[in-house]
């Protein structure tokens, strides 16, 4: 019987899978019941709690530009808990339609048990992500609309 993937191996499979567009394979990196949050999401999206929710999250759309990217500048920090790593990285790439280059930094705090992600806190630069996808105006409008109804 094969040994389950280590937290580092799961993280690398995740970021490489995103970079290479292996959308159908990504949900399989997560436990059936998981807890994935994006604390810096300006729209404060709800946690993703199941593999089915992740399948929907990773579902590709034809909206927006095509991005050519790779995971780079990876630093993985082990913790005193063997299930938990903190991984710093960035996606570097270009927007296919314009040739614009980008660097999208991220930090993941992952808990991997038996080779599957059981929890993840994904810290991304959502403003840069929206800009490179041509969605910055829509993000600002959504944040403004949310702010108007939150108070």
Image (cartoon, helix red, strand yellow):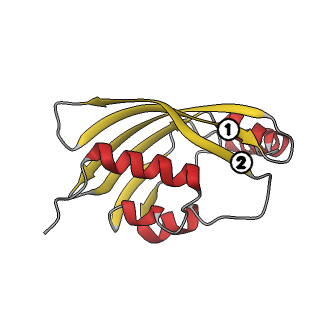
Could you say where residue 4 lies in the image, as x and y percent from the top left? Answer: 21, 58
Image: 137 above or below 118: above
Q: Quadrant of residue 77?
A: top left
The C terminus appears in which quarter of the rendering?
A: top right
Front residue of 6 and 116:
6
Q: Position of residue 31 (x, y in %)?
A: 32, 63
Q: Is residue 107 visible?
A: yes
Report x, y in % for residue 147.
72, 39
Contact, mark 2 vs mark 1 (Cβ under 8 Å): yes
View extreme (left): residue: 1
Task: State the residue at coordinates (80%, 54%).
Answer: 64
Q: Which is more N-terminal, label 1 or label 2?
A: 2
Q: Foreground: 17 or 56?
A: 17
Q: Which mark is residue 18?
A: none
Count of numbered circles on the image: 2
Regarding residue 46, the answer to whether it shows in the image is no
Q: Residue at x 79, y 60 (%)?
A: 63
- Secondary structure beneath label 2: strand
Task: Return the x and y of residue 35 as percentages of the image width and height.
Answer: 38, 54
State how far apart marks 2 and 1 are (Cα). Answer: 7 Å
Question: In this image, 109 relative to 39: left or right?
Answer: left
Residue wearing tag 1: 93
**Mark identifier at residue 67:** 2
Residue drawn at the location 59% of the way across and 58% of the way down: 21
* Front-lying residue, 85 or 95: 95
Give residue 91's quadrant in the image. top right
**In this rendering, is residue 59 above or below 98?**
below
Q: Residues within 10 Å of mark 1 (few under 14, many from 20)?
A: some
């Amino acid at each position: 019987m094969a040994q389950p993937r280590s937290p580092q191996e799961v993280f690398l499979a995740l970021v490489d899978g995103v970079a290479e567009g292996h959308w159908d394979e990504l949900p399989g990196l997560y436990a059936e019941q998981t807890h994935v949050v994006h604390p810096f999401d300006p729209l404060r999206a709800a946690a993703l709690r199941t593999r089915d929710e992740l399948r929907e999250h990773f579902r590709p759309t034809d909206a927006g530009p095509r991005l050519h990217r790779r995971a780079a500048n990876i630093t993985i920090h082990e913790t005193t808990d063997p299930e938990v790593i903190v991984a710093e990285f960035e996606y570097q790439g270009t927007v296919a339609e314009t040739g614009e280059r980008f660097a999208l930094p991220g930090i993941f705090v992952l808990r991997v048990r038996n080779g599957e992600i059981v929890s993840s806190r994904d810290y991304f630069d959502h403003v840069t992500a929206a800009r490179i996808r041509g969605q910055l105006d829509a993000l600002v409008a959504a944040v403004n609309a949310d702010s108007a109804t939150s108070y």
